Image (cartoon, rainbow, N blue to C red):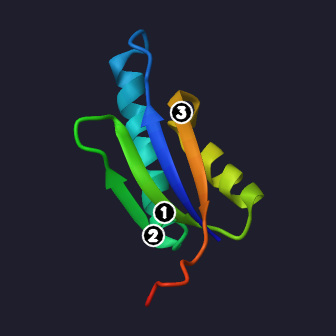
Amino acid sequence: MLYHVKMDVNIPRDIPLETVEAIKAAEKKRATELQEAGKWPHLWRIVGQYSNISIIDVESNDELHALLSSLPLFPYMTIQVTPLAKHPSSIV
């Protein structure tokens, strides 16, 4: 199942910089693992925002929730999920 996922990140300003940098490094590592596993085939930054648009490819809503909640930045995200279906006019 494909999902369009918008993630907006809002890290509180009172978290120490060293902690923020460690969370970001862990986030990059986890995102790389998920992309290499084929679960996160598209990841796009939204220009001018600390946000991304992603296409996630998983078997179920539960797997999507587990994937998203495994992200180190998850506690600081607002996430919008839209399930996708193949369009009848798509040639791909």
Residue placed under numbered mark 3 in the picture: 78
**Kind of element beneath mark 3:** strand
- Asked if the residues shown at circle 3 and circle 2 are in contact, with their CB atoms under 8 angstroms apart, the answer is no
- Asked if the residues shown at circle 1 and circle 2 are in contact, with their CB atoms under 8 angstroms apart, the answer is yes
Does 77 sit left or right of 17 as displayed?
Answer: right
Residue placed under numbered mark 2 in the picture: 41
Name the residue: 56% across, 43% down.
80
Going by the numbered disc 1, the residue's amino acid type is Ile
**Kind of element beneath mark 2:** loop
Q: Residue furthest front?
A: 89
> Badge 1 local density, few (<14 within 10 Å), some, or many (20+)?
many
- In three-dimensional space, the C-alpha distance between marks 3 and 2, rounded to whole angstroms, equals 21 Å
Residue 48: percent from left, percent from top: 23, 36
Residue 44: percent from left, percent from top: 33, 55
Query: Which labelled disc corresponds to residue 55?
Result: 1
- Is any part of residue 70 visible from this angle? no
Q: Nearer the viewer, residue 63 or 32?
A: 63
Going by the numbered disc 2, the residue's amino acid type is Pro
